[in-house]
Amino acid sequence: MPQEAHPRAGRRRLFVPMEFGSIDNRASLAALARTGYAGVRLSGHHVMTDMHDRDLVALIALLRDARGVGMRVSWSGECGNLDVRWLRHLDPPRQPDSTLAWSPPSEAFLLARRGPSSILVDDTRAGPRRHIVIDRSTPAAKVLEATDWGRAITPGERAGVQRLAMDGLAFCSGNYCVGLPVRQGVWCV
């Protein structure tokens, strides 16, 4: 285990310890990444099946956005009977027996790149690369572009969210959802 210290104190890149909920947006993670930290070490043990829907979705958003800013998340938890097959590109929890809850394939990724009128999603989590193009004017695109963690599904988004979840592009719990693709920048055409 690396020592918990400010990264500028030594040459090693370290993990900053924090409580779940003390950080709640991508901008805060990006600020931590700019200071030199390699990742976040969440305190406590997180039993995903016991978490409130909004907190569970916020946890998945944290994992996604940390990956998006180049940070890792070290955390302890259990998945229970939760379907985690679409989460394999994100950092898994360490279970009570010290094993990881899922093992991410080394080449698995799920990236979203935003263009002027569409979102291009590249997915290699289940084998050969899939390219999915989503019109930015659709409710599904609004879910993929949302930046808030633990956002409620609106009635207008419900059908789009269900389709995204079936394709493994969104994680839903109760009335809350988050897009799973790691969000990349905007490209110009």
Image (cartoon, grey):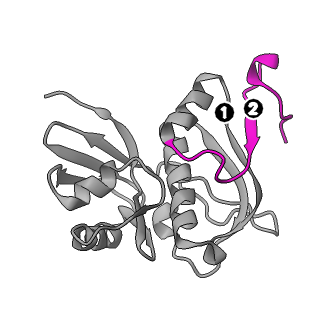
Position of the C terminus, as image quadrant, is top left
Q: Is residue 18 magenta?
A: yes
Q: Residue at x 38, y 63 (%)?
A: 170
Q: Secondary structure at mark 2?
A: loop
Position of the N terminus, as image quadrant, is top right
Locate residue 10: give its quadrant: top right
Question: Residue farthest to the bottom?
Answer: 81
Residue 54 x/y as whole percent: 52, 66
The residue under label 2 is 14
Q: Which residues are magenta?
A: 1-25
Q: Are marks 2 and 1 in contact (CB under 8 Å)?
A: yes
Amino acid type, mark 1: Ala
In depth, the one of 155 and 177 nearer the eye is: 155
Q: Is residue 11 above or below residue 169?
A: above
Q: Residues within 10 Å of mark 1 (few under 14, many from 20)?
A: many
Mark with earlier residue (2, 1): 2
Amino acid type, mark 2: Leu
Q: Residue at x 27, y 72 (%)?
A: 158
The residue under label 1 is 38
